[in-house]
Amino acid sequence: MQDALFRSEDIPDLANARFALVAVERGIDHSPSAAQGFSYRLPEGADAAPGDRVTVPLGRGNTPTNGVVLKTGGPELLGDFPASKAKQIIKVERLGIPEPVVELARWIARYYVCPLGMALAGVVPAAVKKGTGARVRTALVRGPVPDEMPKLTPTAKRAWEAVNALPASAFPIEPRALADRIGEKTIASTNRLRLAGLLTETQIETVSTRTSMFDVGTANTSGTPPAPPPTPTDEQAGVIGAVSSTLGSFAPHVLFGITGSGKTEVYLRLLRTVLDEGGSAIVLVPEIALTPQTGRRFSERFAGEGVAVLHSGLSASARHKAWADARSGKARIVVGARSAVFAPVTRLGIIIVDEEHDGSYKQDQLPRYHARDVAIKRAQLESCPVVLGSATPSLESWHNATKADAKYQLHTMTTRPTGATLPEVQIVDIAAERKLAAQRGRPFEPGAVGLGPTLLDALDETLNDGGQAVLLLNRRGFAACVACRSCGWTLGCERCDAKMVVHTRSTKPGQAPPRGHLRCHHCHAEQLAPRSCPDCGSSLILIGEGTQRLEDDLIRHLDKAHPGLGEHAIARADSDALSHASHYFALLDRFAKGETKVLLGTQMIAKGLDFPNVRLVGVINADTALSLPDFRASERTFQLVTQVAGRAGRGGFAGRVIVQTFSPEDPSIVHAQRHDFRSFASEEIESRRAAGLPPVSRMARIVCRHVDPGEAAHRATEIARRLRADQGVRVMGPMPCPLAKVNDHFRFAVEIVAPSAGVLNRTLETLRNAGVLVSDSATAIDPDPIALL
């Protein structure tokens, strides 16, 4: 009687039903280990594999929700759940995420305390999920050769002989492309072969995009053919041989090479070996600033062999095409920023992480992974070597390569292949410079550092000799804040525990800057700059300076001292001036051609760029990182000064570096002056050891945030109390974060220090399983943090 209530087609046939475990792209922890998903029934006749994307009904409302298949099988995937109650998958898309990448996402979910669905959601670019630029086209494949060949015209017969000589990898192929491949002017002959049954039609998905140098960042604009590869130096050959001997097995390598020592050439040679053995490769660079030159060198060296470039400046369709080329094997080398570590290449032979120390490899949103560490884990899963290259290695990588039980292999390169020496670095005390400037009748502007007399003289000399200069000021905007000269009032952001930064609209040379506006660099609130102090009515002054203010100073100086340098004599490189990657690529192109004489910018110009006519590098204020409340402040200062200094003296001219600082005796600056990384690393690691801080220990940071400060503090207090029950870790906090309020949310931090990653993971997992730690909008869990603000 009950069966009569249902139509026969409403009752699923469960005898042969197939099921799938699915991780939905939502902030849901599926189980204590976050390794499982929800069980769904596959539609009858449908198939799926791990890595496929599906749409499933979620919750009581059966809301269509995207997810990724983790595993397929029979009723055993349901456990004790009744098969008749399993919901059916709505849609299956063959996305093709490699199984090692699915397993990598599982590891990210566990290690970084993140819901598995969110980890998997970050693996595939949004453009790929949306199918941007995708088109379904008709293609041709070779049909089975009949026992008796059909009668063909002489022209069709010649075409068939050419088609039959093509390798199997050439198919499927679109008709027009096939005609071009066999030297036919039209598709008439291939049509005859199709009608004769020798070629058959099939449907393929292709991705179309309008490519340009700004999409891929690899175009050769010099008009000259690329130079032949240089002969490796003895140092380079030694590294190439040592890394090559580990191909086919997991092996972490740290390549410590001074700036200009030819690390990129080592990478290129290693990639050649991997390609020759039929493998593929991933090369990570920290940000799009390094993509143009790096991508260009890789594309030129491996022209015709498939290089896909992935970075945030790509159009959506270009990003989809690069990802699709990597998935299909058309591109065997993927060069890109952080997320390129998930590229769907097969037969992965090597991963290279260039500038491995760079902080942009760490993602500051869920999942808070570090691409360098994820690259190491993927290399382990794929049984291939990983190379971590830098002139200033992170202390974590250096410690792993130099400690007594080191599992990383260390390789060093101490000379430049061109024979050039490292540039001379001169430390200049800003306090002394102020006195000298006053004596010359050109005092510093109030509240600013600017170009001191020593650096200004060196700049004039460089420009007079036909050289180029790079000036680093790692602070954007016009000024750090506005203040009252009488009562000391400063304007802070109403929503954040931070000062409002002064910005101005761009001005032309000789024009006074317009009235500026103020912007919070945390919540992005804006307002016009006040005309007077709201407390006492006195006039206001600008405190500190940013790249905009320095640009105005430079324009005024060059307009007087060096007239006629041209419209593009000065270029500013920061996120305010360069709203799109194409703007940055065009700027670098002008600098390479010599149209731009002075390149001014933030840390995006401090690394990776190679221009032979750069004869002067100036660091306007080396103390911007030293003042931060972070135990890594000295490390970052050393890295920044050393990296930007390395841009000088790469051609036939001696390089000169001038570093302005209020702290001329700080060890990080003194060691950077001497290009002495080993001494700096040794002293800094011993200092960290005494304090029990990374890299000799492991750290996690938990930040609780709420619009009610009491609620945020209560939550952090409870987490700290539960953590202190674990005797294997050291707990600090709860305490207000140095940046105590952001976007109207109060922030309290708890920091955990453990002797090893295993102990740290066990502690976090215990609290996660107990429901105490949940990664959501109110609680940020950050293993291995690189910033403590």
Image (cartoon, rainbow, N blue to C red):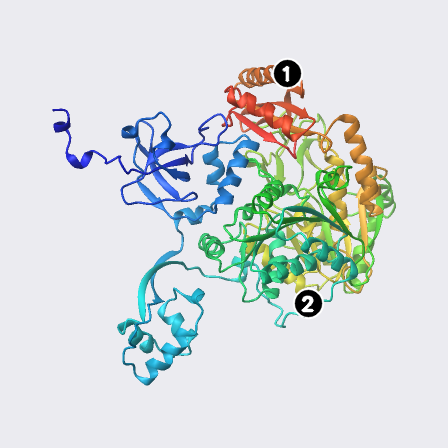
Q: Secondary structure at mark 2?
A: loop
289 or 758: nearer the viewer: 758
The amino acid sitting under disc 1 is Arg
Q: Which residue is mark 2?
A: 229
Residue 710, given in percent of the width and then of the height, sits at 55, 15
Horizontal side of 136 relative to 446 (left or right) equals left
Q: Is residue 462 visible?
A: yes
Residue 392, given in percent of the width and then of the height, sits at 74, 46
Q: Which residue is mark 1?
A: 724
- Point out the image quarter for the N terminus: top left
60 or 153: nearer the viewer: 153
Q: Residue at x 46, y 47 (%)?
A: 97
Give neighbour class at mark 1: few <14, some 14-19, many 20+ (Cα, 10 Å): some
Residue 744, given in percent of the width and then of the height, sits at 53, 26
Give neighbour class at mark 2: few <14, some 14-19, many 20+ (Cα, 10 Å): few
Residue 573, given in percent of the width and then of the height, sits at 64, 51
Q: Secondary structure at mark 1?
A: helix
Using the numbered discs, state the Cα–Cα distance from disc 1 to disc 2 in whole angstroms: 58 Å
